Amino acid sequence: MKQSVFYILLTVFFFGCKAQPNPSFTVQKNNNSLLWEISGNGLKKPSFIFGTFHLLCKDDIHFSDQLLKAVKSSKEIYMELDMDDPSTMLSGMMYMNMRGDTTLADLYTPGEYERLKNYFSDTLKMPLMILQKAKPYFLVALLYPRMMNCSSPSGVEEELVKIAKRDKKEIQGLETMQFQASVFDSIPYKWQAQELLKNIDSFSVNKNEFQEMLGFYKNQQMDSIKNMLGKSEFGSDKYDDLLLNERNKKWVKKLDTIMKNESVFVAVGAGHLVGDMGLINLLKKQGYKVQPLENK
């Protein structure tokens, strides 16, 4: 396991501080929770971290009283991106394209490209011509709504934005869309293209695994989520360092500064929370007390 390159500069005061209990929140007896409290290590007030799922049936999205209380007690909300900034969506459209003059047709054999084109036109009802410049890995996201057992999928982040606006909480982003696009530019487009085709060819298998992961998420089974992400058909462990680990380390460094000044509510994909290089473990290594809260 890689050692974290980040460290905390603690004053004598911080060394003398002990984690203060927070009686207003009920601690979960096991790790089966998507909602965690971060305290100790000199924090004047606790912060919170919550694992999201980027696409759920709208009827499956429920927020517990403790989660709503955590949002209300936090000064700001941090998500992977600043979800209430209109420029985020606009820049997303701009950065989804591959660099240079590469097109999808350049990444496939004629036979492969024909299969891809037919799938998009016949199954997704979308002409591939309008997506010629799109990064192939971004196009994988177009498959997920077909894996859902409902006609009205929504994002947990989208619903959280509504809660934040209701409570008049400012939303900030841990990353910019430009940075996220650069991550995908670091992964060879040819490899991304093959992953897209593999996802299409293995759609029925991936749908079953997606539904299994969805069940683990709804039941807040964190260990099962961690194990599931390690499966070759579901995860992309070849580029875990780029997609998960390095981003997690940067987020912890950023949060270390932010949380010293204010209480925040952090909402990121649940896959970022689990494992040796997950946010929960990295925060603990930084000296924080991170404990699960009841989230029913």
Image: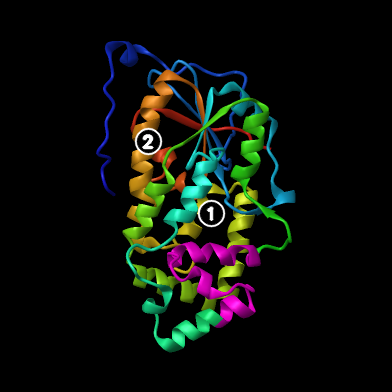
Q: Residue at 51%, 74% (x, y): give it.
A: 129
Lateral position of residue 246 relative to residue 44, left or right: left
Judge whether residue 67 can be spotted in this image: no
Query: What's the magenta region?
Result: 118-147
Lateral position of residue 25 relative to residue 186, left or right: right
Looking at the rendered structure, the kind of residue marked 2 is Val
Using the image as rendered, state which of residue 286 and residue 254 is in the foreground. 254
**Is 146 inside the magenta-drawn segment?**
yes
Q: Residue at 31%, 59% (x, y): give it.
A: 186
Using the image as rendered, state which of residue 207 and residue 103 is in the foreground. 103
Looking at the rendered structure, the kind of residue marked 1 is Ser
Characterize the local packing of mark 2: few (<14), some (14-19) or many (20 or more) Cα atoms within 10 angstroms. some
Secondary structure predominantly adopted by residues drawn in magenta: helix
Q: Are the residues at dot 1 and dot 2 in contact (C-beta closer than 8 Å)?
A: no
Classify 93 as above or below 276: below
User: Which label sits in the foreground, 1 or 2?
Assistant: 2
Classify 248 as above or below 134: above
Classify 222 as above or below 17: below
Please state, as top left, top right, bottom left or bottom right, where the C terminus lies in the image.
top right
Q: Name the residue under label 1.
A: 224
Q: Name the residue under label 2.
A: 252
